[in-house]
Amino acid sequence: MDATPGKGARRETGVILFVLLFPTLVTLLYFVVLASAAPAIQQTAYALGKCIQFGLPALWVFAAGRQPPRRIRPARSGLAVNLIFGAAVAGLAMVLYRLWLHPSGYLAPASPAGQAILEKVHGFGVGSVWKYAALGTFYAVIHSGLEEYYWRWFVFGQIRRVMPILPAILVSSLGFMLHHVVLLGVYFDWALVPTALLSLAVAVGGGVWARLYHQSGSLAGPWLSHMLVDAGIFLVGYDLVRGTF
């Protein structure tokens, strides 16, 4: 138990700031600092960073006893809205790719983004359609679930303890956006328009998922929605890299 309320509040604020910023530090390390390092070094740093990121919530919640987990089982409330939102975003991503990002050269096989994506895919040892499908399935199903557990259940859940609901949604969604700014900036060679617009879209998506999670009390809906969005992104990526298999 904390010796004083002020000490407990400071510790909780420090944890919130850390969990908001740590994924961005991992992304900077992986995509910027180690950009020219060997794939094995990059992947080791990435795996270690992810282990810390996804392990911290369990350590904080269960060791420090901050809050019991909210239910993850499916809830009828809002499930259809989550699925519709995820399908709509995935569809919009493919439309933007076909009508804007690919024709404009922002996201084409020969573009900086296309080459960066190809380099990352090959860095994972993916050299066939089946391996790409396995990688996409892992990110769409497992990684999206871990991100919902981290960003909605833990980060948003902790911020909601100290802020009203709307500011908590805003702060958590901006944190969710921040590491995507680095990722998108690197892929698009820091071109302002696609980096800014797609980063804003990520923040909006994070805000919608936080709101839907708050309403339903279940991670099932946001997880399924996030899964559809990531699946759409990997379909776009496949169009870029399929000629190299």
Image (tube, helix red, strand yellow):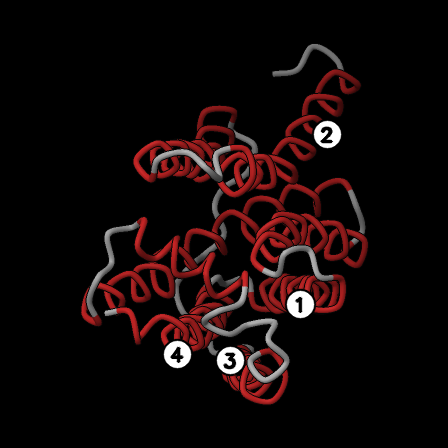
Residue 228 position within the rendered picture, expressed as x and y whole percent measured from the top left: 44, 75
SS label for mark 2: helix
Closer to viewer: mark 4 or mark 1: 4
Residue type beneath disc 4:
Asp
Q: Earlier in the sequence, mark 4 or mark 3?
A: 3
Pick the front one: 142 or 127: 127
Circle 4 — which element? helix
Measure the C-alpha gap from mark 1 to mark 2. 29 Å
Does residue 81 appear in this view? Answer: no
Mark closer to the observer (2, 4): 4
Circle 2 Cα neighbour tier, 10 Å, few/some/many (<14 / 14–19 / ≥20): some
Circles 4 and 3: CB distance less than 8 Å?
A: no
Mark 2 or 3, nearer chain start: 2
Q: Amino acid at mark 3?
A: Ala
Residue 71 is situated, as x and y percent measured from the top left of the image, at 45, 57
Left or right of 231 on screen, residue 91: right
Please name which of the two marks, 2 or 3, marks the residue nearer to the observer.
Answer: 3
Q: Which mark is residue 14?
A: none
- The amino acid type found where label 2 is placed reads Thr
Q: Which mark is residue 90?
A: 3
Q: Which residue is mark 1?
A: 198
Q: Earlier in the sequence, mark 2 or mark 4?
A: 2
Alpha carbon separation for disc pair 1 and 3 = 13 Å
150 vs 239, left or right, is right
Q: CA distance from mark 4 to mark 1?
A: 19 Å
* Residue 92 percent coordinates (x, y): 58, 84
Viewer can see residue 91 = yes
Residue 239's disc number = 4
Instruction: Give the numbered dot on residue 13.
Output: 2
What distance separates the C-alpha of mark 2 from that of mark 4? 43 Å
Quarter of the image for residue 16 reads top right
